[in-house]
Amino acid sequence: MDSVIEVQRQTHEEIERLERAAATLLSQPLTTRRLQIKNEHKVGTVLDRIRDRASTLHSSYLDDDNTRHAETTSLSTPDFTEFYARLKKIREYHLKYPDQPADPFELELAGLMGEDEDLLDVGENEDTVALLFSGEESFGRYLDLYQSHSAYNNLKNLPRHISYVQYLDILAKIKDDGVLHADLAQDIKLTKDFENYITNLYNYLVSFSKRTQPLVDIDTQQREAEKRFEQLWNEGQITGWGEAPINGAANGSEGVYCTACQKMYAKQTVYDAHLKSKKHIKAAAHQDASKVSADASSTPKSNGHASLPPHRYSKHYKAALTSHLIIDILYPLIPTIAETKSNVERRFALTAREREMEAEEPDMANAQNAAQPTTTAAPAEEEAEEEERIYNPLKLPLGWDGKPIPYWLYKLHGLGVEYRCEICSDAVYMGRKNFERHFQESRHAFGMRALGLPNTKHFHEITRIEDALSLAEKLKQEGRQEIFQNETMEEMEDEEGNVYNRKTYEDLKKQGII
């Protein structure tokens, strides 16, 4: 068993070394956003290790099981028996494990600092950060709200569909309005589709904030915002999430709204016919039961306090809470929304060829901007930029220099065309040249031998097993016909000068007639 005091001393040392590592990472000069995001995630990992070790150290000092007190008591005696016993254990341990590193924590610290990246594959190092963001997000520069935009346009009773740029403007208006989607009618906000829409939007914004700001405690901020909402909700200051308009009452100048079914009807006659349907009767009964339970739960307590209005116990509490949390998390992202809008408008003005070039080299502009003013940059920084993982979204083959080949060369050789060979266990070959070459390779020859067929020129361009077998049978029939033609076309002459074909001559000779 390890010494409790030694474990505490070692934990203190590890915390100090982790703090120095975090200070070293934060003091590094970084030129690109990609390196900044990667560095912040490293610092976040180091802070998590510090937090875990501090929690362990705190539990150790509490000494709930009295192990530290017992060890201190045993070491306080003037007898050196305990000392020599521990010294003997240390010697036996090092004799048993002679190759044990003297400082195992140094390896862990080197992994956190990224000092052992030369021992790993370059792609593995970069993918940890590259896979955090989609191509549209561009390492946290822009938001990717296309799914939320599509869900917003699919809401029922929406007055009109809006473009992606207009959707970004609506989210940016939260700075002035202070309310999410203030222009939407109440009957739209009280639907289940709207609740699902804002829930997915909230989950994405929280995920984006955590990925772009790993050093910010987003969860704590959200818990504080939830407490503020709970207070406002109990005080009745959150409006717009009560009950919907009464059944049969016109919603403005557009139709009649049914609260039980949460559906709008264009005319009063259609609404009257709907009241007799089984679906409405069932929904109305369920609504009445919900109101009875809400009234029972809202009765005054024994302390004499009056109950809150019934609509404060509405089933739309979750949607109201999520909308309030989105407001708090959207405020820091308003500059990012503006940059996203500018990027979308800029891409609309690009041609198809320009978009392809931008997809191939997204960081070229940043690299040029960083290279112009840094005439005195250190060579080590330039080498670090060159050693970054090559951006290859089109999955182009690599050339002799280890970089993707040009897109025009990729199209010229037809490397985007797939050729499938059933004989080679449904293997796929990219490009005509690779497809023709594989007929002479060992894999195709092994497949032909498994079918019992020779890998000859006759079977070139044959990829299906059925076609290969039918061709082999056809070749056999042609071979038999050729043998028969040789027997009938070749002429033989006997001693008397009579001429026969070869088959007749051999048959007469065997019978002794000739």
Image: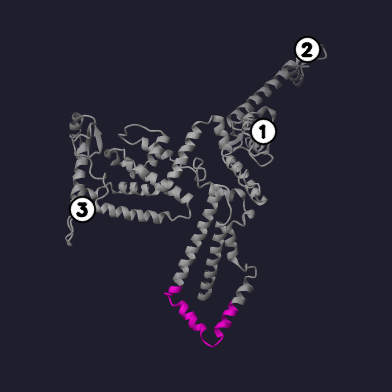
Q: Residue at x 56, y 33 (%)?
A: 356
Question: Which numbered disc, 1 or 3, marks the residue that appears first in the sequence?
Answer: 3
What is the magenta range?
61-89
Percent across and percent down for residue 132 are 50, 47
At label 3, the amino acid type is Leu
At label 2, the amino acid type is Val
Question: Which numbered disc, 2 or 3, marks the residue that appears first in the sequence?
Answer: 3
Q: Which residue is mark 1?
A: 439
Percent across and percent down for residue 46 are 52, 60
Query: From this viewpoint, which residue is outermost toward the right?
Result: 495
Magenta-drawn stretch, dominant element (helix, strand or loop): helix
* Viewer-nearest of discs 2 and 3: 3
Q: Considering the numbered disc 1 on the image, is that residue within a helix, a strand or a loop?
A: helix
Q: Are marks 2 and 1 in contact (CB under 8 Å)?
A: no
Q: Residue at x 46, y 79 (%)?
A: 69
Percent across and percent down for residue 151 are 38, 38
Depth check, front residue: 487 or 212: 212
Depth check, front residue: 77 or 190: 190
Q: For marks 2 and 1, give the CA distance.
A: 49 Å
Number of other residues with Cα within 10 Å of mark 1, as a class: few under 14, some 14 to 19, many 20 or more: many
Question: Is 83 situated above or below 378?
Answer: below
At label 1, the amino acid type is Phe
Q: Considering the numbered disc 2 on the image, is that residue within a helix, a strand or a loop?
A: strand
* Viewer-nearest of discs 1 and 3: 3
| 2 left or right of 147 in image | right
Q: For marks 2 and 3, give the CA distance.
A: 124 Å
Q: Which residue is mark 3?
A: 308
- Give me the disc on residue 499: 2
Question: Is 281 situated above or below 52?
Answer: above
Q: Residue at x 67, y 50 (%)?
A: 379
Question: Which numbered disc, 2 or 1, marks the residue that appears first in the sequence?
Answer: 1
Residue 63 painted magenta: yes
